[in-house]
Image: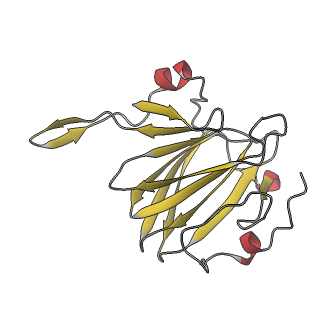
Amino acid sequence: MIFTETRLKGAFILELERRDDERGFFARSWCQEEFLAHGLNPAIAQCNISFNRLKGTLRGMHYAAAPFEEAKLVRCTAGAAYDVIIDLRRDSPTYKQHVGEVLSAANYRMMYVPEGFAHGFQTLEDNTEIFYQMSQFYSPDHARGVRYDDPAFGIKWMIADPVMLDRDRTYPDFTG
């Protein structure tokens, strides 16, 4: 795998190192040793799938509060999505900054989201599926979110008027 750190310390874009032949290709998409060598959390407590029927669906921006903070490895397995993370680590020099990357079934890229980050995505095609590997078990009592269009973060989404839950649309202004 090819690990490229984003400008947000500890957050990475991962790309496959493909071994192509006449049958197609083979590639490793996760390796505990490689994650540890890059200082990343290799724990996998559960895996989740998010299927989204409509282009423009926006899910996020979600995170988990301590002690259930979670690292995520996110991959688009069908369609395409604009995947966004926000650094919510108060002691970080990139606090409140974000990074976005197009993940698609065609480009095979993955986003590694460290603990302390909010995460969300907007689908760029109908019938988009996102697959997550999570380092922590889900705890509804620790689930949190920040608003996708909060001016504190300045995220420019690719599609106006997203399809989304009222919960995600109505988080209060970030005061952190």
Image height of 69 relative to 81, above or below: above
Residue 161 relative to residue 87: left or right: left
Q: Residue at x 81, y 51 (%)?
A: 142
Q: Residue at x 71, y 56 (%)?
A: 62
**Residue found farthest to the right:** 175
Residue 61 relative to residue 48: left or right: right
Q: Which of the two residues, 145 or 44, is positioned nearer the viewer here?
A: 145
Looking at the picture, how far across and down is residue 119, in whole percent?
A: 65, 53
Looking at the rendered image, the quarter that the N terminus falls into is top left
Looking at the picture, how far across and down is residue 75, in whole percent?
A: 46, 50
Q: Residue at x 73, y 69 (%)?
A: 168
Image height of 91 relative to 61, above or below: above
Residue 139 relative to residue 109: left or right: right
In which image quadrant can residue 70 be found?
A: top right
Q: Residue at x 41, y 31 (%)?
A: 2
In which image quadrant can residue 29 be found?
A: top left
Q: How is the structure coloured here?
A: secondary structure
Q: Which of the two residues, 170 or 99, is positioned nearer the viewer here?
A: 99
Looking at the picture, how far across and down is residue 141, in whole percent?
A: 82, 54
**Residue found farthest to the left:** 22
Looking at the picture, how far across and down is residue 118, in whole percent?
A: 70, 51
Q: Number of callouts in the render? A: 0
Image height of 4 relative to 62, above or below: above
In which image quadrant can residue 66 be found?
A: top right
